[in-house]
Amino acid sequence: MTRQVPVRFGDRSYDVLIGPGVRSALPGIIDRLGARRVAVVSARPVEWVPDTGAETLLLPARDGEPDKNLTTVESLCAAFVRFGLTRSDAVVSVGGGTTTDVVGLAAALYHRGIPVVHLPTTLLAQVDASVGGKTAVNLPEGKNLVGAYWQPAAVLCDTDYLATLPPRELRNGLGEIARCHFIGAPGLHGLPLAEQIAASVTLKAGIVSADERDTGLRHLLNYGHTLGHALEAATGFALRHGEGVAIGTVFAGLLAGLLGRITPDRVSEHRAHVASYGLPTALPDDADPGTLIELMRRDKKARSGLTFVLDGPSGADLVTDVPEPAVTEALARMERAPLDRLVTGAPAGTAGTEAAVT
Ligand SMILES: NC(=O)c1ccc[n+]([C@@H]2O[C@H](COP(=O)([O-])OP(=O)(O)OC[C@H]3O[C@@H](n4cnc5c(N)ncnc54)[C@H](O)[C@@H]3O)[C@@H](O)[C@H]2O)c1
Ligand SMILES: [Zn+2]
C-alpha cells in the first residue's frame, strides 16, 4: 500500500510517496515535470535505479560524509552541463541522506535551480533528510556549513530499499522516529515501518510548511538533538546521529522533569519509549559532563545560554537560558554504559523486525 503525504509550500508543494515499489512512480513524475533529460545521481547499484521515461545520464556517487562537499557539487554540475541539462529538465538522487543533501544542493545551484526528485534509500533519509528542502554540504571546518533551501519536486520513499540496510543504519533512522512521540506524533511504536515513516514525514511536513526557513516552529524537530549533537562530537562520531538523538531524548525528559515541566511518569515514558525501539538510553561511560555542557553551549540553536527543546504542559517548546546546575543534575541522573555496548549491545533492529518493512 502506498501512502501519500503532501508537503505544502504554495506553488512549490509536492508529495512524498511511501511504500514498497514506489520508485516506479518516477517516470510519471518526470513526465509531469515535462523534463526531456534527467541526470540520475545514484549511490546505489544500477539495478536500483528506476526507469525515468526520458533520456537519462546515470552518474554514480558514493554515500558518506567525505563526498558531501563542494567538489562533488562542482563535478555534478559540470556533468550536467556536458549532458546538456537545462532548467526545464530534472535531477534525481538515489542514496542516503548524504547523497540527497549533496544532489539537492547541486540542483539548487545549477542554473539557479533545477527540479530534483529524491529517492532516499536509508531510513534516516526517508524520515528526515530528503523532506523539507534543506540541502547542505560540509567544509573541512565543519558539517553542513554551506547549503540552500531547495524544495524537491517529489520524494519517493521506496521501503523495498530498506531491506538491505544494516541494523545500525536502521536504528539510526529509528532514533528520529522515536523522538516524534514527544513532538506531535505519539503512539507510532509497533505500527508497520511504512506507517511510522508516513507519520514521521507527515509531522515534519506540517512543521516545515509552517516554518520553511527555520525561524520558529522547525526547532521542534531538534527534540533530543542538543545532547545528541554533543554526544556525536564527544565520541568522535562513534555514535550515529540517531543513537545520539535517542540518548538525547531520554536526557530531555530528565531535564524537563527537573525543571518541573513534566511529571515523573512522563519522564519515565521518555526512557521506556526510546528503549522500546531497541535504542540506547545511557551516556557512554567516559563522557565527561563538563565537555558535553561546553559542546551544548556551542549548539547552533543556542541563541541564549543553554537551549533545549523540552516537553511541557502544552507540548514541546524551545526553552532558553536553562540553568547549568539543572543540566549537570540531569546528566548525573543518566544511566551509564560502555560505548561499545551502546552501539551494539541493545537488541539492534528490534523495532524494525517487529515492524514489517513494508
Ligand atoms: N537536509 C536535511 O534536512 C537533513 C536532515 C537530516 C540529516 N541530514 C543529513 O543526512 C546525512 C545522514 O544520512 P544517512 O544516515 O542516510 O547517511 P549516509 O548517506 O552516509 O548513508 C548511511 C550508510 O548507509 C548506506 N546505505 C544507504 N542506503 C542503503 C541501503 N538501502 N542498503 C544498504 N546500505 C545503504 C550508505 O552507503 C552509507 O554507508 C547527514 O549528512 C546529515 O547531515 C540532512
Ligand atoms: Zn536529526
Image (spheres, rainbow, N blue to C red):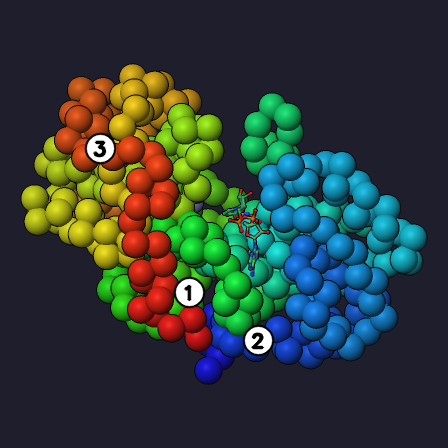
User: According to the image, label 1 marks what residue?
Assistant: 197
In which quadrant is the C terminus drawn?
bottom left
Q: Would residue 356 be seen by someone viewing this image from the given angle? A: yes
| Mark 1, other Cα within 10 Å: few <14 / some 14–19 / many ≥20 | many
Left or right placement of residue 91 versus residue 66 in this view:
right
**Which quadrant holds residue 291?**
top left
User: According to the image, label 3 marks what residue?
Assistant: 336
**Amino acid type, callout 2:** Val
On screen, residue 355 above or below 96: below
Q: Residue at x 61, y 63 (%)?
A: 119
Mark nearest the camera among 3 and 2 is: 3
Foreground residue, 163 or 14? 163
Foreground residue, 133 or 189? 189
Q: Residue farthest to the bottom?
A: 1
Left or right placement of residue 122 versus residue 341 in this view:
right
Separation (CA) of disc 1 from disc 2 = 14 Å
Foreground residue, 273 or 33? 273
Q: Residue at x 41, y 38 (%)?
A: 239
User: According to the image, label 2 marks what residue?
Assistant: 22
Foreground residue, 321 or 65? 65
**Which quadrant holds residue 201?**
bottom left
Looking at the image, tell me whether mark 3 or mark 2 is earlier in sequence order. 2
Q: Secondary structure at mark 1?
A: helix
Percent across and percent down for residue 339 are: 33, 34
Q: Are marks 3 and 1 in contact (CB under 8 Å)?
A: no
Separation (CA) of disc 3 from disc 1 = 30 Å
**Which quadrant holds residue 282?**
top left
